[in-house]
Amino acid sequence: MTKYPTRRGALQGLAALAATAAVPAFAQSAWPSKPVRIIVPFAAGGTTDILARAVAPELGKAFGQSFIVDNRPGAGGNVGAEIVAHAPADGYTLLMGTVGTHGINRALYAKLPYDPIKDFAPITMVAGVPNVMEMQTEKAKALGINNVKDFIAYAKAHPGKLNMASSGNGTSIHLAGELFKARTGTYLVHFPYKGSGPALVDMVGGTMDVMFDNLPSSLALIKAGRLKALAVTSKERSTALPDVPTIEEAAGLKGFDATSWFGLLAPAGTPADIVNRIQHEVAKSLNTPAVKDKLVAQGAIPSGNTPAEFAKLIADEHKKWAEVVKVSGAKVD
């Protein structure tokens, strides 16, 4: 004889089932229950670091936990990116990725210790920025360089005599310089650093001759008169430096465009709920006057796009920068 459950037994079973089904949702909503690390794959003081430190306290306020910026520089951002690629997919280790770590390095490096597509879950692009071609002000004056055409003329007359600083192999700062060299037929000796911060120290000190830095990390030095901005590398002029021409305007290099972007990523497999919650709070913070006005004043263009939009940008950038690497002839073993 078939035994059917009583009404009381059925209700108990449904209650047990509901409790079981609620566990994953409860576990996800409990995140974060401890501090979250944001790995910055470059030294302190550069644009990647500036942007991470702009959003970290906002995320901390939103989620009630500390979001700690952890600088792990080296190998054009690959050291920090690898740490996050191999971290647990639990939402407690994030990366402030860049056009270098996720758009350039796959084409530039013979061997990459991570896959920029498969090993990460894109969260959101935080901001885009132009790069700025700059020299130490007194050095530019001593060499008689007032503009980009003067620089090209001097570099061609003195091949290999000018040093070009960058924030590391494979960064947009490096590739902007390589593209400039390829388009102008000049020979500049590349010196990679572990971030814009230490490179700028030597730029201001006069050890280095030229740099194609991300604008936010150099803007204060330019406004203080310690660095001379020759041009920006974007298609349009920057609102932060409206009197500084684009390289296309300054040197007639049609279509020259070497802009940078920065965004948050998590290890692949991080729960979508966590990814979406972070994206929502970053986008919200980028729309507050306190954060937005600060970034715009530094030459950055805030974003806050969706994970899907950011993933598409990364895929598109792979194609674009692979071509730039090919044209420039740059390669790193």
Image (tube, rainbow, N blue to C red):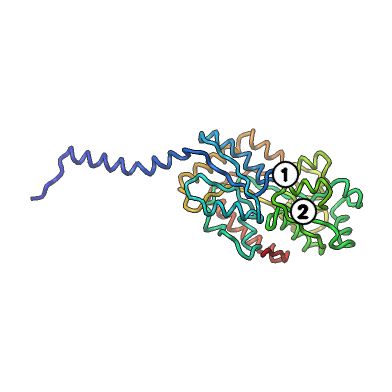
Kindly identify which residue carries mark 2: 165
For numbered disc 2, what is the local secondary structure? strand
Kindly identify which residue carries mark 1: 217
Residue 59, by quadrant, is top right
Asked if residue 49 is positioned above or below residue 315 in the image, the reply reads: above
Q: Which residue sits at x=20%, y=41%?
A: 10
Question: Quick one: 28 or 235, which is closer to the camera?
Answer: 28
Where residue 143 appears, x then y in whole percent? 91, 52
Q: Could you tell whether 155 is left or right of 1 in the image?
A: right
Disc 1 marks which amino acid? Ser
Question: Quick one: 302 or 209, which is closer to the camera?
Answer: 209
Where residue 301 appears, x then y in whole percent? 67, 44
Q: Could you tell whether 303 is left or right of 33 in the image?
A: right
Name which of mark 2 and mark 1 comes first in the sequence: 2
Asked if residue 252 is positioned above or below residue 126 in the image, the reply reads: below
Disc 2 marks which amino acid? Ala
Where residue 219 appears, x then y in whole percent? 76, 42
